[in-house]
Image (cartoon, helix red, strand yellow):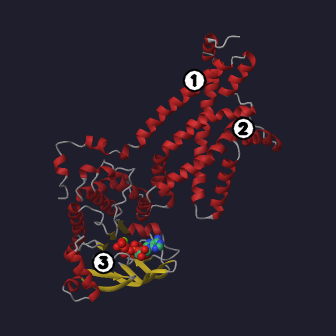
Amino acid sequence: MQIWSWHGFFTYLGSPYIFRGALITVYMTAVSMVMGFLLGLLIAVMKRSQRRLLSWPARFYVWFFRGTPLLVQLVVIYAGLPKLDIRLSVMACSIIGLTLNEAAYLAEIIRAGLNAVPTGQIAAARALGLSERQIAWRIAFPQAFRLIIPPLGNSVNGLLKTTSVTSVISMEELMQRSQILVQDQFMVLELFSVAALYYLLMTTAWDFLQRRIEHYAERPYRRQQQSVAVDPIELPVTTQDAR
Amino acid sequence: MITLDNVTKSYGTFQVLKGCSAEIGRGEVVVVCGPSGSGKSTLIKCINALETFEGGQIWVDGMAVRSAQTDHSALRAKAGMVFQSFELFSHLSILDNIMLAPRLVQKRAKDEIREHAKTLLRRVGLERHADKYPIALSGGQQQRAAIARALAMKPDVMLFDEPTSALDPEMVQEVLQVMTELAREGMTMMCVTHEMGFARQVATRILFVDAGEIVDDCPAADFFAGRCSMRAQAFLRFEADHPG
Ligand SMILES: Nc1ncnc2c1ncn2[C@@H]1O[C@H](COP(=O)(O)OP(=O)(O)OP(=O)(O)O)[C@@H](O)[C@H]1O
Ligand SMILES: [Mg+2]
């Protein structure tokens, strides 16, 4: 047996079977990230509440889902739900597991973001008569979101690779498909190199996307960019426009 | 317009307000002064329910502040507030800062709000900065925008909590000028400030707060003519020697 087969490597690289596995990985990441974010937002808000009826369940949730392995959570969902007569596809079980797990981590990130919103601006919004709900949606969430884009980006990057854990419940994502071919054709290095390349490609694409999102969200906080828009002829007047 | 009736408030065992009473009529400009930590900010924040208080009552235009029936949103729409550190919403443009509350709270027509906002921006000299974000403005400009934002709710009374204390000296005047004009137009104002020049120009009354009590409440003319308590006089002399 050869040490390395370029032929094998390129065959797998062009294999639609592996490519579709990668698409499934992207799909699972996107769906669990979005749902996990929404659930995480709810849990973060509950955890910050003064009411114990809200904050304690949230604390329990975060404690539980961060304190047990994703692998165990997935197996429990996959093996447990049918016993309750709930029959879901492997894909549904995978997404539920990833979402529930990710939400616990995202809740802590979101909570940090909400804590960092200037309290003075919250007071100003209150003084203007905005309701607590309006303050949350119009002031707190937008400002918190901008602050947490870097750690959220980390989570997306991590999740792209964490999806491979769903292979334990035989979810056919990129990693599982690579392993299936390994069992058949024994080209471990070639196959896993192709998988690694796909993961790199996906994380790189995300890096690029994250930079675009960050650039957009930072718009209100850039000084120089805005002065460009000022008519240079009018500039001297600006300093004394107090009339 | 505003009636304070024996207002008391404590933080734990520490009593911040020890029975404050005062009456502020429509069109009056009341300047509140006193040493640091005496409870001036706390007092003014009780008026629009940003702070709760345990004893006494405050009425704003007939609305009781400390009451379960009172709609805090309506109360706050009556009383505009300007903070020491501006507190403009940093993710919104100046125009959006001004238009936000009239749209969300008062649900006025968008066109009318926009026109009103532009008028206000002209009034505070910021019409060319409408589309900028707060970070691109100087402190004085930000504070003027914050005043416009409060005025956009068409309040009956304006509350100021040391509006010029965070400003560089050269920007203090531009903000005081806007406030002076506002006072001359007949706006009811309650203003915590150490700017005695401003007080001398437009104040109708001076409240002197010390250790949670209104120790002095006298017409501005008397205050500046030296016909008020020794404590206030001493403070005034100190302020004159240490402006700002
Ligand atoms: N959240 C709080 N918890 C406990 N004590 C507080 C709190 N806020 C204010 N205090 C105390 O209440 C007192 C009055 O505070 P306040 O901010 O009203 O003073 P002030 O007159 O506005 O002072 P300054 O001129 O420095 O602004 C101070 O002694 C302060 O330490
Ligand atoms: Mg104060």
Q: Is mark 3 within 8 Å of ligand 1?
A: no
The Cα atoms of the two marked residues, 1 and 3, are separated by 69 Å
Q: Quadrant of ligand 2?
A: bottom left
Q: Residue furthest front?
A: A3
Dot 3, how many residues are within 10 Å of its Cα: few (below 14), some (14-19), or many (20+)? many
Q: Are discs 1 and 2 located on one and the same chain?
A: yes
Q: Where is residue B75 in the image (x, y as percent from the top left)?
A: 43, 70
Q: Quadrant of the N terminus of chain A?
A: top right
Locate residue B203, reporting x and y percent.
Answer: 24, 77
In the shown orientation, is residue A49 left or right of residue A97? left
Residue beneath label 2, please? A93
Which one is nearer the viewer's eye here, B24 or A152? A152
Query: Residue at left 64%, top 42%?
Result: A99
Asked if one can make out residue B40 in the rendered structure from this viewpoint, the answer is no
Q: Is residue B185 above or below residue B222?
A: above
Residue matched to label 1? A197
The numbered mark, 1 or 2, whose residue comes first in the sequence reads: 2
SS type, badge 2: helix
Residue in the image at 31% along x and 82% along y: B208
Q: In x, y percent, where is residue A235?
A: 19, 46
**In which quadrant of the rendered view does residue A164 lie?**
top right
Q: Residue B33 carries which label?
A: 3
**Relative vertical location of residue A182 with respect to residue B233 in this rendering, above or below:** above
